[in-house]
Image: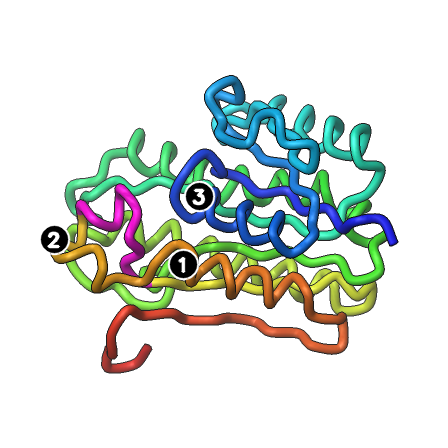
């Protein structure tokens, strides 16, 4: 059977690159959305298509989907991983901050889902995986307030897609990690990176979700590197 195909946004490093590595190792082919394709470590891999993707450029989203279908002829999974953090409270945030973080963390994944949806419906078990954050479940500090607002919306997007796929069989799952040992996570956590959830841990979860049949619908998976009161 032809290898299944997954699109992964924000795949230049960190969680996105770990997801790509895991899927390639498990026999998937991947289409990677990055801002600078020419610097991607996956360039030249015959099972990886590296495309330009910028969450602030809607035309790049359409071009990426078109290139993926043109190259592989199918799409089985869409992984929303690209995101950004602006460390401001809801009292400090300005309109420009709100627009920027919601454009990247919410509007772009919504548009990509709309473009990819017809192709996912044609798959035997189409899947959307949104890598959100535990900040989409609770607001941990004042400084994470603006970020949490965008991640609450990203979680709602995942649930909205889940409802859209109820009859067609396209399943949507939101993964909500706490601090992960990436450049951003290490800077924010201020602790030994080996104590944090590793990108490869999230990649294993994403792979598991993508491999599930349509008879297994999982709404959310919260992930914490330690033990939190609720998660």
Q: Residue 110 vs residue 62: left or right? A: left
Q: Which residues are magenta?
A: 178-187
Image vertical order of residue 54 relative to residue 114, above or below: above
The numbered mark, 2 or 1, whose residue comes first in the sequence reads 1
Residue 138 position in % (x across, y down): 30, 67
Tell me, for residue 190, which label it has, or none.
Answer: 2
Q: Nearer the viewer, residue 89 or 225?
A: 225
For the N terminus, the quadrant is bottom right
Between the C-alphas of marks 1 and 3, the distance is 10 Å
The stretch drawn in magenta includes residue 138:
no
Q: Of 169 and 196, which appears nearest the observer?
A: 196
Q: Residue at x 72, y 42 (%)?
A: 116
Residue at image position (84%, 37%) is 73
Instruction: Point out which mark residue 152 bears.
Output: 1
| Residue 105 badge | 3
Q: Residue at x 38, y 44 (%)?
A: 14
């Amino acid at each position: 059977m032809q290898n299944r195909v997954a699109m992964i946004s924000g795949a230049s490093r960190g969680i996105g690159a770990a997801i790509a590595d895991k899927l390639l190792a498990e026999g998937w082919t991947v289409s990677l959305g990055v801002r600078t394709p020419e610097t991607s470590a996956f360039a030249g891999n015959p099972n990886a298509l590296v495309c330009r993707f910028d969450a602030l450029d809607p035309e790049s989203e359409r071009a990426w989907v078109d290139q993926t279908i043109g190259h592989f002829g199918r799409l089985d999974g869409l992984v929303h991983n690209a995101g950004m953090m602006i460390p401001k409270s809801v009292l400090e945030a300005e309109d420009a901050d709100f627009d920027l973080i919601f454009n990247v963390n919410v509007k772009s994944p919504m548009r990509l889902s709309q473009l990819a949806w017809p192709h996912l419906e044609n798959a035997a078990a189409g899947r959307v995986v949104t890598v959100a954050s535990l900040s989409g479940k609770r607001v941990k500090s004042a400084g994470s307030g603006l970020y949490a607002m965008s991640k609450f919306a990203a979680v709602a997007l995942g649930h909205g897609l889940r409802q859209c796929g109820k009859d067609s069989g396209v399943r949507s799952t939101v993964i909500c990690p706490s601090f992960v040992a990436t450049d951003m996570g290490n800077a924010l956590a201020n602790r030994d990176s080996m104590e944090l959830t590793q990108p490869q841990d999230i990649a294993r979860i994403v792979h598991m979700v993508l491999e599930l049949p349509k008879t297994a619908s999982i709404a959310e998976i919260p992930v914490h590197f330690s033990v939190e009161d609720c998660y």
